[in-house]
Image (spheres, grey):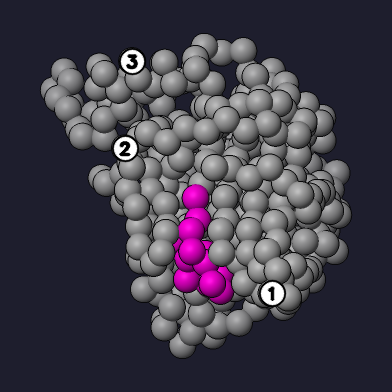
Amino acid sequence: MGRAMIIGAGGVASVVVHKCCQNSEVFEEIMIASRTKSKCDALKEKLKDSKTRITTAQVDADCLEELVALIKDYEPDIVINVALPYQDLTIMDACLATGTNYMDTANYEPLDTAKFEYKWQWAYRDRFRQAGITALLGSGFDPGVTGVFCAYAAKHHFDEIEYIDILDCNGGDHGYPFATNFNPEINIREVTAKGSYWEDGHWVETEPMEIKREYDFEGVGKKDMYLLHHEEIESLALNIKGIKRIRFFMTFGESYLTHLRCLQNVGMTSIEPIDYEGKKIVPLQFLKAVLPDPATLGPRTVGKTNIGCIFKGKKDGKDKTYYLYNICDHQECYKEVGSQAISYTTGVPAMIGAMMVMTGKWRKPGVYNIEEFDPDPFMEALNRFGLPWKESFDPVLVD
C-alpha cells in the first residue's frame, strides 16, 4: 500500500511501530525518526523479521529545515507524529511544505504555557485544504477513540446526544511510589492545570482536582476520579449535535496525589525557568529526568485500564443512555508489544488513524478532528488490532 514516517521513539512510538508491522499490507515501509537515532535502531532491531521494511533516521523535530529535508528524501504517504505536543506545529509546517498527509495523537501546547487547545492547529485548515492534504488530529485514545465512540453513538444510537461523560480509569500498579504512565512533563502539566467542562454553550472552569466522583469500573473496581480539562471536549462541543454538557474524568490513586501535592508545594512542577549554578533550568523538566521513564514500566505494571464514554440523549423521542468502553490489560499488552496499556491504548489508534488516511477511507483535504469521519471502519479496526470495545445499554450514570 505505501510508506509512513513515524516521528518519535518513546513508548507510544514503539507500539505504533509494532502495530504497523502487524499490518504490513498497508504499511509496506516505515521510517522511524527521532532526535536519538539509537532508540530508532533498537526498535528496528526488535522487528527485523517483520515483512514491513524499516529504516531509521536522526531528526530534530523542532527544526523545520531538517524535517522538510527528511520528508522530501523519504517521500512518505503520511507523517505519524508521536513526538511532543510542543512540536505539532513545526511538523505540520513540514507536511505543508512537502505536500504530505499528517496525523497526531495530542493537540499542540506552547512550551512556555501549560495550556492546550485546538486553535493553533485549526488555523491550518485553509492551508491544508488548498494543499490537497489531510491533517488528522488526536488519533490516540483520549483524544481519539473517545471521539470515534461519540461519532459511533451519534450515528447508530441517538438522534441527539445531550450529555457525554468521558471516563479514563487506569487500575494499573507499577510498584513505584510515584511515576507517570506517559511523558511526565505532559502528564503533570495536564493534571495540575485548572479543570473545565462544557455546559450550555460555554466553559465552566474549576480548580485543579476540585470535582471528585467515585465510579465502579468493570475489570478494575471502585476508583476515585477527578474532573480535568481535556482537549477532545473542545472539538466534540462543536461536532456533536445537540450537546448540552461534556465532562472528562480521570482516576488517580492517593499515593500519586500526595506525591504530586508535595512536588507542587516545593516548586518542582513549575514550568518557569530558574537559575541553578549559572544555568537556566525548568523544574518540571528536571523532575522528568529523575522520574522513571514510562517506556520502562511495561514489565512491572499489572492491572487493567477501562476507558470510555457514557452518553445520555434521545432516540425516537425517548430518553436513552448508552456506555461504550474498552478494557485493556497491562500485562497482555507487554506480552504482545513490550509496552504497558497506556502506551498501547494510544499507539494502536495512532496506527489505525494513519491506516484510515493511507487507504483513503478518511482522506479529504483540510484539518479534521477524528469524530468528523465515518466511525465504522475505525471501530472495526479496533476489534481487529487489539482494542475490542464493549457496550452497555443501562449504565450507571455519573451524578
Asked if residue 87 shows in the view, the reply is: no
Q: Is residue 138 above or below residue 365?
A: above
Q: Is residue 293 above or below residue 369?
A: above
Q: Residue furthest bottom?
A: 130
Give the residue at mark 2: 207
Q: Distance between the residues labelled 2 and 1?
A: 37 Å
Q: State which quarter of the image contains the C terminus.
A: top right
Give the residue at mark 3: 262
Q: Which of 9 and 104 is in front in this view?
A: 104
Give the residue at mark 1: 317
Stretch in magenta: 234-247
Look at label 1 and name its amino acid: Gly
Q: In this view, does 58 lie above or below 276?
A: below
Determine whether the residue tagged by mark 3 lies in a helix, strand or loop: helix
Look at label 3 and name its amino acid: Cys
Q: Earlier in the sequence, mark 2 or mark 1?
A: 2
Q: How far apart are marks 2 and 3 (CA)?
A: 17 Å
Asked if residue 227 shows in the view, the reply is: yes
Q: Position of residue 351 (x, y in %)?
A: 70, 56
Q: Earlier in the sequence, mark 1 or mark 3?
A: 3
Q: State which quarter of the image contains the N terminus.
A: bottom right
Can residue 60 be found in the magenta stretch?
A: no
Task: Tell me which corner region of the image, top left, top right, bottom left or bottom right, holds residue 217.
Answer: top right
Q: Earlier in the sequence, mark 2 or mark 3?
A: 2
Q: Distance between the residues labelled 1 and 3?
A: 51 Å
